[in-house]
Amino acid sequence: MITWHCDLVVSIHVVSDVHGAAAALEGAAVGSDVFVCLGDLILYLDYEDPSQGIYAELFGEEHSRAYITARTAGRFEDARELSAAAWARLGIVDPQDRRHAMESHIRKQYEAMFATMPQPALMTYGNVDLPALWDEYRKPGHRLVDGEVVEVDGLKLGFVGGGLMSPMRTPYEIAPEAYAAKLDQLGPVDVLFTHIPPQIPELTYDVVARRFELGSSAINAYIERVQPRFHLFGHVHQPLSRRTRLGRTECINVGHFHAKEVPYVLQLEEPRG
């Protein structure tokens, strides 16, 4: 367990779904005692601006628009066929070669992200992140926390990163059983931080993408059992609702940082013994 010391009121700034907004990170920790990043640093596709992101760099804006249209409509097989055809036009067929072709673009984004990521920071993975590359770019003040608790003057902050296996096939998806095990090993916490939301319809439905994203029923079970004061998460960019309660726990989507470029601010009083 990591222990940090602050004043009697702890101000926690939280970002999630940064998706390439490196410049906006520079001021995101100003005024905070603790800075938290809940992942999704890489921008593969920009649903609002298809000219941005790795897919646009590789295949052009027209392809990105068509690919986004297919995914938004839930036509994932069509999207995969579009992707395969785009790779074939570049002369790349083998999936290993695809990963190699994308790696330089991913590394360029990670280099920019970690260069502007505030220090110190508590960080966990999103579903589009590549954990194997983080250690190459993390600075000394960037603490990776996944399935672990950080204590800030008596406040216990628990972290679980990554997403669940889905039709999207994003890079860091894990089996529901493995995800539940990471939650279970936390024990009681005051604030739970995850990338994905609990499995609650109003928190998982994206009103722009017009689909339900994956939430975790294991998070629901953990909250019902432990009842932390807060659960903070991201993942759903435009949710039907940004907050609700499970028992005494307030569940809050911290917002799509790529679009808003401002952190969510949580202020907590330290427990007094």
Image: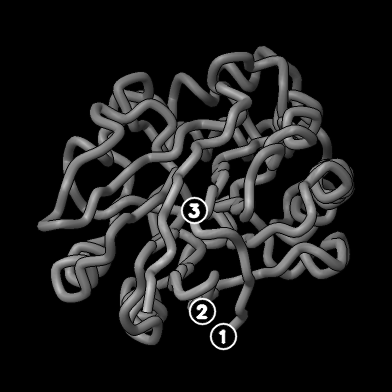
Q: CA distance from mark 3 to mark 1?
A: 21 Å
* Residue 147 spot, x, y in % from top left: 48, 78
The residue where tag 2 is placed is 148
- Residue at 24% from the left image edge and 30% from the top image edge: 241
* Closer to viewer: mark 2 or mark 3: 3
- The answer to whether marks 2 and 3 mark residues whose Cβ atoms lie closer than 8 Å is no
Q: CA distance from mark 2 to mark 3?
A: 23 Å
The quarter in which the C terminus is drawn is bottom left
Which amino acid type corresponds to the residue marked 3 in the rendered image?
Answer: Val
- Quadrant position of residue 139: bottom right
Q: In the image shown, does 124 or 173 lie closer to the viewer?
A: 124
* Closer to viewer: mark 1 or mark 2: 1
- Quadrant position of residue 163: bottom left
* Residue 71 spot, x, y in % from top left: 43, 30
The residue where tag 1 is placed is 1
Q: Is residue 37 left or right of residue 196?
A: right
State whether residue 227 is above or below residue 83. below
The residue where tag 3 is placed is 9
Asked which secondary structure carries label 3, the reply is strand
